[in-house]
Structure formats: structure tokens, C-alpha cells
Amino acid sequence: MPPSSAQNGRTATAAKPRRRRGEGQWALGYREPLNKNEENKKNDDGLNVRDRIINIYSKRGFDSIDPADLRGRFRWFGLYTQRAPGIDGGKTAVLEPEELDDRYFMLRVRIDGGQLSVAQLRAVAGISRDFGRDTADITDRQNVQYHWIRVEDVPEIWDRLESVGLSTTEACGDTPRVIMGCPLAGVAEDEVLDGTPEIFQIYEEHIGSPLYSNLPRKFKTSIAGCSVYCTNHEINDVAFVGVRNEAGEAGYDLFVGGGLSTNPMFALRLGAFVRPDQVSEVWAGVCAIFRDYGYRRLRTRARIKFLIKDWGAEKFRQVLEEKYLGYALPDGPAPVLDQGLRRDHVGVHRQRDGRFYVGFAPKVGRVSGTSLDRIADIAEAHGSDRIRTTADQKLVILDIEEDRVESITAALEAEDFQVRPSTFRRQTMACTGIEFCKLAIVETKGRASTLIDELEKRLPDFEEPLTINVNGCPNSCARIQVADIGLKGQLVMNDRGEQVEGYQIHLGGGMGLDAAFGKKVRGLKSTAEELPDYVERVLRRFQDQRKDGESFAA
Ligand code: SF4
């Protein structure tokens, strides 16, 4: 059940405003919008744009769209204008937003828990072919993202998605985004518990609710009982991590306040044990604290990580229990993290029911409607109705009988979906980049693909775990700060003194036992052209100098 209005802190909004300039916290009385984004949200809830898209904009076309909807509320349904073609990265920061806008949209479909049936995958694939020029990317939050979408086609796209139980509601915007879950939930031999019921309880009870549709900024959730922590609780706004308490009962350890971007922070552990039947209301309590106490004055300080950094975990837990839940949560154990484990679930592995799952690697998450349809065909032909997206831009097919494993592996590899990929194919990710993203400074997916090809040729025997994450700007959509090698797109000078696309290098990031942000070494930059040479040099030096068993991060 959602918390009552008294529990969720709305009564606190009656408090008198302080005189000194505040951070825009509603619960302290700062209800007047303090910036344009807040003003837009106050003027009209983002969820209300759905009716206008169906009844007005899709009928009258792009030019009829109110600018406040186009650059604001459309996001509440996963729609962003994509970058107009031909604008180089040097113009990203100097042009007005409307000069960067194309008349086409990126559309993000939320795949909560990364869970798809064959019918759902076919629907996703068909939309890509019919309306998105066959584009589709698997994102590192388990979503599928299209490009080239016209506003005229959005109602038909929503009809098709909703007919198979999918949606784009709150896929972007200042809202609770997709809820991440382990792709192996319910089948993994060594999971602590299956988070699927909790994920879909939250989805049913809270996603699309006006109670949580005006948050200070985005709010990212992960819920998993995965033994390798594949949904990266360390960098989610709220995360429920499967643990067993002293009595052997399975439940969750609660983390709050992780996030990357320009001020990366790891989530803090509250030390509370949450039973599965409490997850939805605890989630609602954390989300409501963010709504009520989150800093709305500056967008750059509006994530929940800044609030919990100021409050500390103890105060946050106290406010959650006393003001929002109305009861205390018991203390609980911390998850036992390991170091250097691959979290991606690629390869062939046995499920606990004796069947197998097959995880495979499209290059940097790039697929197409046509290839997604092929994956649906292959899954169905091998007796599976369960396909999963991962937090590493990969896919997994569940429930394969042992005598079909060889056949499905061959069928996937024939489509270049590698089940036994090189380290480089397996562990390189890239964000959208300048091809479609208005914030981008450089190209990413194409460059990362070239880098994979080059490293496979130059270092064919390299087998150690190694993550290479490529971003097109200082935001961290592809998690550069927690990669072994993080590449942040920017303009750099080449040998001839020309400004060209390149990357600032971050080295030695990682998650797990020794979670750390990669170090940005001053002056350590590479032009895009020289990138394969640079990475090859770093990796050869690592191979030459490593001691037995030493990982790259160490
Ligand atoms: Fe766009 Fe930057 Fe995010 Fe890449 S990291 S998708 S360039 S905002």
C-alpha cells in the first residue's frame, strides 16, 4: 500500500518557510518554483502531457507542440528530441536548445526487471522497424531506446506496447525511472531471493502516480537478490540488495543515494533489514523523502545523493522510520561483496531447475528491430518464452534444455550475438553519443565498436576482466567513473594543434568490495583516432607488470 498522506510527509509542508535562502525543499516551505524546470512542473504535471500527445500533437504535428511540453513534459513518457544531424560537438554548449533539436524523437521503453516475453520482444521489434528506422539500443538500465520517432506515430506505438503490458511512462523525466532487476531472478542457482514480485508491486502501485511524478530530479531503483550484484546497487538512488538475516530469513539490505554524473557518490547503507512485503512502502517512503526534502533550487544538486550526504545515513533512516513509515525497521546484515566478479551474466550457465540460460553480447548494446525479431525467433524455436536485458547492454535467454544449448548458441552466433565473446566485446559499453544525443560532444558507439575490433586483433589472448566504458560528454550514462578504463568525451588538441574529438581517461574505477571511482589523471587524454593505440599500450603494460592474479583495478 502507498503511505497515507500523513505518513508520506505531506503534513510537513505546512512548516513556516525560513528566511534564509533555501535549497527549494518543499518540506521546509519552499514551494515557490526556484528555476524554470520547477516552474514547468508546477504549471502542469508531466503526466498530463499524454492526453495532449494523443489528442493534439500527434494529429497536428511537430510544429504544434508547446515548447514547455517539448523540452520538459514529453520526458515523462520517455520522449526526447534527438540531435539534429550535422551539428558537431563544438557547438553543443553554445547553441540554444532549439537549434540542436531535430524534429524526431528518441523514445525509451521501460523494461522493468529487464523482463520480456517473446510476444513483448516481437512488439518492441515491430515498433523499431515500423516507426524507428530499425533502430534500437539496449541501454545500461535494461531499457530499449529507439530513434527517429515521429510524434504522429506515438499513440500507435503506445497502443502496441500497452497491448503486451509494456509502457514508456516515466521512462525519463523527474520521476521514478525503470526498476532494475537481475536478469536471472527466479532461476539463478545461487540467488538470495527473487526480486520480481517487489519490482512489479512498485510498478503497479506507484509508477504513473501523481504522488511521485514531480520529484526534484530522476530517481533510479534497483531490486535484486543476485549473487554478483548485477544491478549495481552502489550507484542507484535507492537499492534493495538481497541478504539473509541471522534467522536465515531472506530480505533486503537498503542503500540510498548512489549516482554518477559530475559529482559521483556511492550509495550509503542504512543498515536496515527490509522484508519483501515491506519493499513497496519503504520504496515509497524513500521516494517521498526525496520529493519533500530534495534540493530543487539547483538542478546540479537535485539528486537524492546530495541530501543523504548532508543528512548522513542515520538521520535519513530516522526520518524514514518516524515520519514516513511509522515503524522501525530492524537492523540487518550487509551483503557480502566480492571483488572483480563479472556482473554481466554472459555465457551458458545452469539454472537451478536444471535448464540453462544463455547470455550474449551485441556490440555496445546496439541492435535493431530486425535483429530483435531474430532473437525472438531463436528463443521461441528453442522452447523459451523469457528474454532478459542486462545492466551491461547485453541480453539473456532463459529456460533452455541442455540438449538445445549447442543449437541456440550456434543460432545466436550466426547473427553475431556472441555467447563467448572476447573481454573487449563483453565488457565495453557506450552511451548514445553525438549520433543522437543533444548533450554529446563526441561520437561513442561507432568508436567503441572500432576499439573492440582493434583490441581483439591486437590482443587476441587478453582474457582478464576489464571494463571499458565510453561516454560522449561529462554526464555518465555509460558509467565511466566505475570502469577500469573510463573514456569521457571531450574536444582535445591533436599533434597538429587542431581541436578534434577525443577522450579524458579515467583509470581504475570499479564496484564491489573495493568500489572506487576511476582516477582522472591530469593531462591524460587521447584523440579518438589514437584511442586504440593508447588502450593497447595501457593493457600491454598491465600484462607485462602484473603480479600473479592481479586484476587491472588493483
Ligand atoms: Fe548523451 Fe552525455 Fe549521456 Fe552520452 S553521457 S548519452 S553524450 S548525456
Image (cartoon, rainbow, N blue to C red):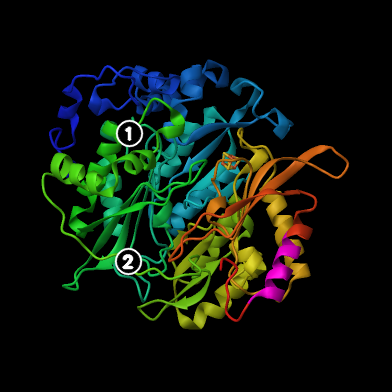
In space, the residues marked 1 and 2 are separated at their CA atoms by: 27 Å
Asked whether mark 1 lies closer than 8 Å to ligand 1, one says no
Q: Nearer the viewer, residue 199 or 274?
A: 274
Q: Which residues lie in the magenta part? A: 535-546
Left or right of residue 126, residue 256 in this image: left
For residue 510: magenta? no
Q: Which mark is residue 350?
A: none
Q: Is residue 513 visible?
A: yes
Callout 2: 10 Å neighbours few (<14), some, many (20+)? some
Res. 250 image quadrant: bottom left
Secondary structure beneath label 2 = loop
Mark 1 residue type: Gly
- Lower position in the chain sequence, tag 1 or tag 2: 1
Judging by the rendered image, the residue that carries numbered circle 1 is: 294
Secondary structure beneath label 1 = loop
| Count of numbered badges drawn on the protein | 2
Left or right of residue 202, residue 127 in this image: right
Q: Is residue 127 visible?
A: no
Mark 2 residue type: Pro
Q: Position of residue 187 (x, y in %)?
A: 36, 71
Q: Position of residue 130 (x, y in %)?
A: 58, 41
Q: Position of residue 242 (x, y in %)?
A: 30, 64
Q: Main secondary structure of the magenta part?
A: helix
Callout 1: 10 Å neighbours few (<14), some, many (20+)? many
- Relative to 44, is 274 above or below? below
Judging by the rendered image, the residue that carries numbered circle 2 is: 335
On-image quarter of the N terminus: top left
Left or right of residue 151, residue 356 in this image: left
- Relative to 553, is 84 above or below? above
